[in-house]
Image (cartoon, rainbow, N blue to C red):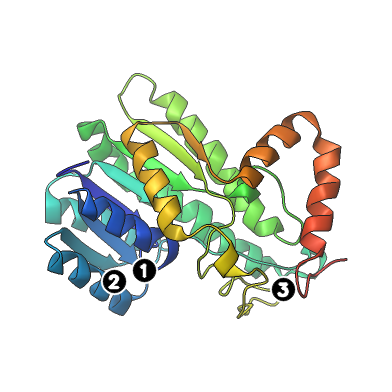
Amino acid sequence: MKDKVIVITGASSGIGKALAFVFARHGAAVFLGARSKDKLMGIVAEIQADGGKAAFASLDVSVENDCKNFILKAKETFGEIDVLINNAGISMRALFNDTTHDVLKRVMDVNFWGTVYCTKYALPFLLETKGTVAAVSSVAGIKGLPGRTGYSASKFAIHGFMESLRIENMKTGLHVMMAYPGFTASNIRNTALVADGTQQGKSPLKEENIMPAEQVAENMYHSIRKRKTSMVLTLEGKLTVFLNKFFTRVLDKLVYHHMAKEPDSPFK
């Protein structure tokens, strides 16, 4: 990855921020996007202070023109694009019966359409470099999670999009990868939308007891470098893949009871 150009969305915190530092540490130039300009400025300054190459642009991935300008700015800044990591995302937590359509649309606009928009405008440049397009998914993209209908739907949609893209480009040299990191310490649960569209404000999980974003980023770095098609992290994630394939109804019950135990769970 030395001297490669890595474009990362949702780079102001969590996995995106960790990815920026990991790739920069390995000698890549990173171009970062998120809505929080101040946070991006701090990250870029820190990378540059350590001798790395980094730049940023403000980005709301739910806005197509933002995605177009972001990708073009990355190309203009560093001359090429070798890797696009679609990491930006939001979550939700509420029963479908109680949730407004606006919540589901917002989640889909950010998670799915943000991935589609950025990939669409980066694809010509990635084909030139025979580069990589990656998307950060979740266990919720492997197994539908109760209370997260919109979130799971968006991640399943990304899976279908990326898989189709990979097969379309079997002969072009484009590398397409899906990452399923499992529960990761980040801000995504604090900002998750509830039934009326407001933010949840706190995580139902003990963030200090789950996988750090830095560990996810290191694994993603090596998976992208090795051009893997998918990356499933955590024992929980790997068990989910196995059980969902062979013991679907058993897993349904396990997932239900696991999610129902969360503090302030929307169902019991």
In 3D space, how far apart are the residues under numbered discs 3 and 1 (Cα atoms)? Answer: 26 Å
Above or below 115: residue 240: above
**126 or 38: nearer the eye?**
38
The quadrant holding residue 241 is top right
Circle 2 is placed at which residue position? 40
Give the Cα distance between marks 3 and 2: 30 Å
Q: Nearer the viewer, residue 85 or 97?
A: 85
9 left or right, relative to 89: left
Nearest the viewer among 92 and 25 is: 25
* Amino acid at pointer 3: Ala
Tag 2 near tag 1, CB within 8 Å: yes
Name the amino acid, label 1: Ser
Query: Label 2 is placed on what type of residue?
Result: Leu
Left of 165 or right of it: where is 11? left
Crowd class of label 2 (few under 14; some 14 to 19; many from 20; radius 10 Å): many
Q: Is 190 placed left or right of 81 in the picture?
A: right
Q: Residue at x 43, y 53 (%)?
A: 215
Q: Classify mark 2: helix, strand or loop.
A: helix
The residue labelled by disc 1 is 12
**Is the Cβ of the residue at disc 3 closer than 8 Å to that at disc 1?**
no
Q: What residue is shown at x 77% (from left), y 28% (from top)?
A: 246
Which corner quadrant of the image does residue 146 belong to?
Answer: bottom right
Q: Between disc 2 and disc 1, whose residue precedes?
A: 1
Residue that numbered label 3 is attached to: 195
Whole-number angstrom distance, CA of label 2 to CA of label 1: 5 Å
Q: Secondary structure at mark 1?
A: loop
In the rendered structure, find residue 121 and report the number of the disc placed on it: none
- Tell me residue 1's x, y (percent): 22, 41
- Residue at figure coordinates x 82%, y 48% from the top left: 254
x, y percentage for residue 227? 36, 31
